[in-house]
């Protein structure tokens, strides 16, 4: 008998337009959808007028449900695996069944789509050449400390997920260990209140007080020469001083400030004349 296929299907992280045509087709074609939260997925399915049997597959029943799903896959049924939002397996359930499929030579096919960490990274302005995704920092003190040390040592860009009510605590921990490295806080991606806050950790800490919504933190690697947005927190005079301290000549400084601020050189000259 022919074995079925497991499709790992990414769903939107906010904006429903971010589902792919292929994802919609696969969700319509499979025999069964395994969903992290069936009520949440039902809303998505209703929006796209898809009617399909759902089975719950979340962190607390992953082992048991994997057995059930394996029986179906081995008997030839096709299954789509989805999480509440984004890409399954990325800080979301998925790993257990995917491993089991690989062991049993069942095809696992990715259906690509939204993933919060990738989209936060690509628009952060911090280097995406080499990066390390660390998901949520552990709450256990010892493991958390170990992860923070790892972050401190990393020359690669670090990506963290964080819940809004824990973000101040996390930023404080980061500030203690990293001093003032550059950070980008990406919030509510693809949604109405989408926002990128860029600056050093102290600046982000100030701005993060009372923030709501879903959050990704992008942290510059040690000694990384990422795009410098720190001028955003500087007055024109401080901006000038920053380049002067780097040993640049007046003409070059004006040129650089104009470029950073996306205005003409003339506007910068005028401001200094005033
Ligand atoms: N699997 C998902 C993915 O592909 O990104 C991540 C799931 S994880 C349980 C949820 C976390 O992802 C949130 O706490 C937040 O850190 C991040 N996240 C999810 N959606 C987001 C969004 N629209 N904007 C910013 N961060 C988001």
Image: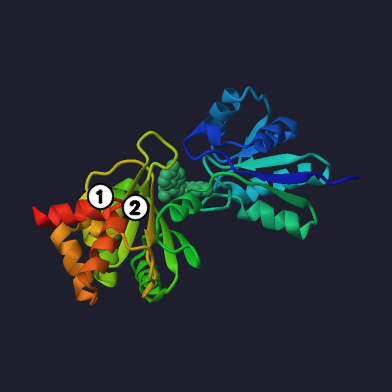
1 or 2: tag closer to the N-terminus: 2
Q: Does the image show residue 205?
A: no
**Residue 18 higher or lower than 132, as above or below:** above
Q: Residue 26: x, y in percent?
A: 71, 36
**Residue 224 higher or lower than 47, as above or below:** below
User: Do residues under tags 1 and 2 come within 8 Å of each other at their CB atoms?
Assistant: yes
Say few, some or many: other residues with alpha carbon within 10 Å of mark 2 (under 14 / 14 to 19 / 20 or more): many
Identify the element where label 2 is drawn. Answer: strand
Q: Residue 6: x, y in percent?
A: 73, 46
Would the CB of label 2 be found within 8 Å of ligand 1? Answer: no
Q: What residue sits right under mark 2 in the picture?
A: 185
Q: Nearer the viewer, residue 240 or 65?
A: 240
Q: Residue 228: x, y in percent?
A: 32, 63
Task: Write the residue at 61% across / 25% down.
Answer: 48
Q: Quadrant of residue 184?
A: bottom left
Q: What residue sits right under mark 1 in the picture?
A: 208
Task: Write the residue at 23% across / 62% down.
Answer: 254
Task: Write the residue at 58% across / 48% down.
Answer: 88
Q: Which mark is residue 264?
A: none
Q: Does the image show residue 220?
A: yes
Which residue is outermost to the left?
274
**Residue 156 higher or lower than 95, as above or below:** below
Q: Nearer the viewer, residue 116 or 30?
A: 116
């Amino acid at each position: 008998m022919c074995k079925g296929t497991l499709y790992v299907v990414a769903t939107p992280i906010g904006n429903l337009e971010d589902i792919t045509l292929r994802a919609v087709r696969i969700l319509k074609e499979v025999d069964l959808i395994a969903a992290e939260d069936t009520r949440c997925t039902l809303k998505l399915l209703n929006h796209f007028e898809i009617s399909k049997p759902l089975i719950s597959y979340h962190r607390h029943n992953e082992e048991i449900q994997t057995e059930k799903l394996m029986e179906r896959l081995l008997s030839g049924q096709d299954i789509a695996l989805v999480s509440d939002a984004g890409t399954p397996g990325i800080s979301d359930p998925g790993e257990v069944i995917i491993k089991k499929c690989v062991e049993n030579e069942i095809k696992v096919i990715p259906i690509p789509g939204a993933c919060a960490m990738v989209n936060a990274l690509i628009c952060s302005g911090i280097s995406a050449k080499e990066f390390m995704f660390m998901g949520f920092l552990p709450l256990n003190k010892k493991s958390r400390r170990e992860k923070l040390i790892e972050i401190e040592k990393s020359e690669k860009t670090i990506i963290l997920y964080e819940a809004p009510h824990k973000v101040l605590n996390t930023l404080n921990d980061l500030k203690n260990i990293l001093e003032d490295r550059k950070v980008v806080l990406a919030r509510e991606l693809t949604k109405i209140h989408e926002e990128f806050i860029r600056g050093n950790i102290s600046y982000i800490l100030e701005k993060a007080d009372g923030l709501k919504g879903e959050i990704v933190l992008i942290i510059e690697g040690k000694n990384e020469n990422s795009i410098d947005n720190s001028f955003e927190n500087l007055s024109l005079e401080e901006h000038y001083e920053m380049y002067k301290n780097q040993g640049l000549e007046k003409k070059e400084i004006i040129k650089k400030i104009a470029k950073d601020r996306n205005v003409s050189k003339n506007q910068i000259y005028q401001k200094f004349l005033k």
